[in-house]
Amino acid sequence: MSPSAQPDLDPTQREIQSLVRDFARGEIAPHCDAWNRDHHVPVEVLRAMGELGMLGAIIPEEYGGAGLDYTSLALIIEEIAAVDAGTSVGVAAQNSLGASPIVRHGTEEQKRAHLPALATGERFVAYALTEPDAGSDAASLRTSATADGDDWVVSGAKQWITNGGFADLFILFARTGGPGARGVSAFLAPRGEGFTVGREIPKMGLHTSSTVELAFQDYRVPGSAMLAAEGEGMKIAFSTLDSGRVIIAAQACGIARGALETAVAYAQERTAFGGPIARLQGVQFPLAEIAARLDAAWLLTLHAARLRDAGAPHTAAGARAKLVASQVAVDAANVCVQTLGGYGYSAEFPAERYYRDAKITQIYEGTSEIQRLVIARDLLGDAARG
Ligand SMILES: Cc1cc2nc3c(=O)[nH]c(=O)nc-3n(C[C@H](O)[C@H](O)[C@H](O)COP(=O)(O)OP(=O)(O)OC[C@H]3O[C@@H](n4cnc5c(N)ncnc54)[C@H](O)[C@@H]3O)c2cc1C
């Protein structure tokens, strides 16, 4: 089963979907319960995905990537997330948060220096925007970068950085000028002296994903490490998130599908009162409702991905897709737990993992409240800003 709505995928996209599905079922599914239980981040499996082209999915072929579009990346992430959400965000972050700003804003030299190793998984990249005191209000970030000759000297702290525990390179956003969005610049920051990768933050779910704190104390980056121009940082940050949200919507659809498949299979097997619980309308209706809403969420996601691929504005479409898909993921996981009854509450069945993992899709790359804000501004124009 997959979301039944799969319109107009071309043969290559269908091939990618089936290749990733086989990989996820063969290489991730047999292990992911243990990985999640042990909080093991499967970097070795991520690297294997690099060899198959998944880590460099959206990196152009001339820089060693697969040269795929965002629709294909959405298909990849949906398939992996249906099996393990934590592994899927590792692939998503490498592509849509890490490589994408380099592809879009890097100089030729920066692209040649970084993209080939990111495409193969020889190196990993993380996106370092959020700080302990600046999340939704990212433009208020306080990490500073001060000019010193040709270098920039960075001090400050970052929080919640996906893939940070093993990343070699960070898209680092720091304040190089005055307050607000215009004072922020972006840097390609490798690990180095004055750059501390801190603890893994204990989380409700996504136990196969690395999420760390970072600290900078007089950390130096050369001027050549700046991405685009001084003061362009927040534009880069926001445009990266615009596309990244489409991919998180795909992740949410994958989690929802995994939960729905688990619930359907269980309902067909489990007997109560003389027959399978699947014959009970009270069990059928929540599953039917999720199936219909999942198709709608998936269509929104593909629509937003296609706008991105066509070079059309996709900010509001991505926000709509993420808002809807993340709610479907949370509701599907809830229905899954309920359908499995006591086994749904057991850590020995995947339902409770879907339940814990689904929630993150309403929080990262912009909370659901921020998605509503983006949609409302698009809908109401300047009047929405007061
Ligand atoms: C597992 C995980 C991985 C992450 N990975 C990354 C990463 O790789 N890189 C990175 O930079 N960040 C990452 N993040 C950070 C994530 O994007 C932020 O947590 C998120 O944007 C919310 O910011 P916050 O946690 O500071 O919450 P806050 O901004 O403090 O929000 C708290 C609450 O207030 C609400 N709120 C805030 N402003 C408004 C408003 N204007 N209107 C209505 N409601 C509002 C929010 O919706 C939320 O409910 C990650 C977070 C997690 C948990």
Image (cartoon, grey):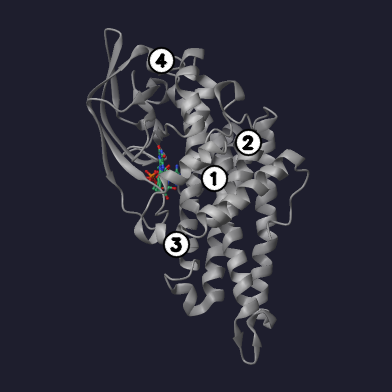
What kind of element bears circle 3? helix
Q: Which mark is residue 70?
A: 2
Counting from the top left corner in percent of width and height, residue 185 is at: 39, 21
The answer for how far apart the CA atoms under marks 3 and 2 are is 29 Å
- Crowding around mark 2 (Cα neighbors within 10 Å: few <14, some 14 to 19, many 20+) is many
Rendered location of residue 189, percent (x, y)? 35, 24
Q: Is residue 184 above or below residue 303?
A: above
Q: What residue is pinned by disc 1?
A: 248
Q: Is mark 1 within 8 Å of ligand 1?
A: no
- How many C-alpha atoms fall within 10 Å of the one at disc 1: few (<14), some, or many (≥20)? many
Question: Which quarter of the picture shows residue 71?
Answer: top right
Residue type at mark 4 is Glu
The answer to whether marks 2 and 1 mark residues whose Cβ atoms lie closer than 8 Å is no
Q: Is residue 78 left or right of residue 356?
A: right
Nearer the observer: mark 2 or 1; the answer is: 2
Label 4 or label 1, whichever comes before in sequence order: 4
Q: Which is closer to the viewer, label 3 or label 4?
A: 3
Looking at the image, is mark 1 or mark 3 earlier in the sequence?
3
The x, y position of residue 108, in whole percent, is 51, 13
Mark with earlier residue (2, 1)? 2
Q: Please give the name of the residue rendered at 48% of the width and 36% of the height, measured from the top-left corner.
A: 94
Mark-to-mark CA distance, 4 and 1: 29 Å
Q: Would residue 192 be seen by someone viewing this image from the given angle?
A: yes
Residue assigned mark 3: 33
Residue shown at the point (73%, 57%) measured from the top left? 4
Quadrant housing the N terminus: bottom right
Q: Is residue 67 above or below residue 222?
A: below
Q: Is residue 47 above or below residue 174?
A: below
Q: Which residue is mark 4?
A: 230
